[in-house]
Image: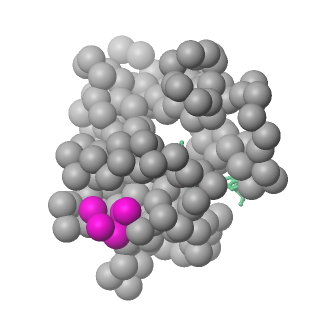
Amino acid sequence: MISPEVRPLRTMDANRCDAIIASLPYHFGLEEGRLECAAAVRGQDGLVAVVDGLVIGFLTFVRHYDAAAEITWMAVHAEHRRRGVGHRLLDGLCRAIASEGRRLLLVLTVSASDTGSEPEDGYQSTRSFYRSVGFVLGRDLPGYWTDDTPVLMVRPLGLAK
Ligand SMILES: CC(C)(COP(=O)(O)OP(=O)(O)OC[C@H]1O[C@@H](n2cnc3c(N)ncnc32)[C@H](O)[C@@H]1OP(=O)(O)O)[C@@H](O)C(=O)NCCC(=O)NCCS
């Protein structure tokens, strides 16, 4: 386990976020996705995880209505996965958006019902990660993406007022 500092994403982090994406060729195999992610790290709010001055993971997010937010992109450098960095980023995000009064966190990822073949460390590990930080499977959204079928996963952040 490692204990990175978690701080807001800044413009100067963008190139390093691109490098993190490039370290994960299976998960970010489509150029269209990489370009969308590159735009997100240059335009959306986000958080980064930093160890010894080096960004090793990040997430970006958008706000929806008054009480929800959605993770748009998230990645931990291939050399640092499964050491608690994703959990730290999620903790930071939940604290930040809960402090704005938001009560629901959303994320879309590739569904188990997707017809494509999946390697051992494919999106089932991504879904396991989101479950391990409190998300539950909501519903599949067939046709929403061009290539894969996404599943909407949701995480409540507190009791409704
Ligand atoms: C998903 C991701 C952001 C998680 O960050 P991380 O730092 O690796 O995750 P953490 O170390 O905080 O949490 C690990 C937990 O997630 C789950 N998990 C992560 N990788 C897993 C794997 N390969 N198999 C099964 N469970 C896995 C487990 O519950 C694990 O806990 P454990 O190690 O105690 O069993 C990161 O692995 C990643 O960048 N994956 C590739 C890109 C991606 O899928 N991005 C999300 C797109 S929607």
111 lies above or below 11: above
Residue drawn where x is 49% and y is 73% of the image: 3
Measuring from the top left, give residue 56's x and y in whole percent. Answer: 44, 70
Residue 137 shows in the view? yes
Q: In front: 86, or 23?
A: 23
Q: Residue at x 32, y 52 (%)?
A: 38
In the rendering, at what x and y percent does residue 62 appear? Answer: 30, 34
> In which quadrant of this rendering is ligand 1 seen?
bottom right
* Nearer to me, 5 or 64: 64
| Foreground residue among 134 and 142 | 142
Q: Is residue 43 above or below residue 2?
A: above
Figure colour scheme: one colour
Q: Is residue 78 above or below residue 46?
A: below
* Residue 94 lies in the magenta stretch: no
Residue positioned 42% across, 38% down in the render: 71
Q: Is residue 6 visible?
A: no
* Image coords of residue 100 (percent x, y): 24, 33
Quadrant for the C terminus, please.
top left
Reply above or below: 133 against 66. Answer: below
Residue at the extreme bottom = 52
Could you tell me residue 147's position as x and y percent?
58, 30
Residue stretch rendered in magenta on the structure: 14-18
Residue at 20% across, 46% down: 43
**Principal secondary structure, stretch drawn in magenta:** helix
Which quadrant of the figure has residue 58?
Answer: bottom left
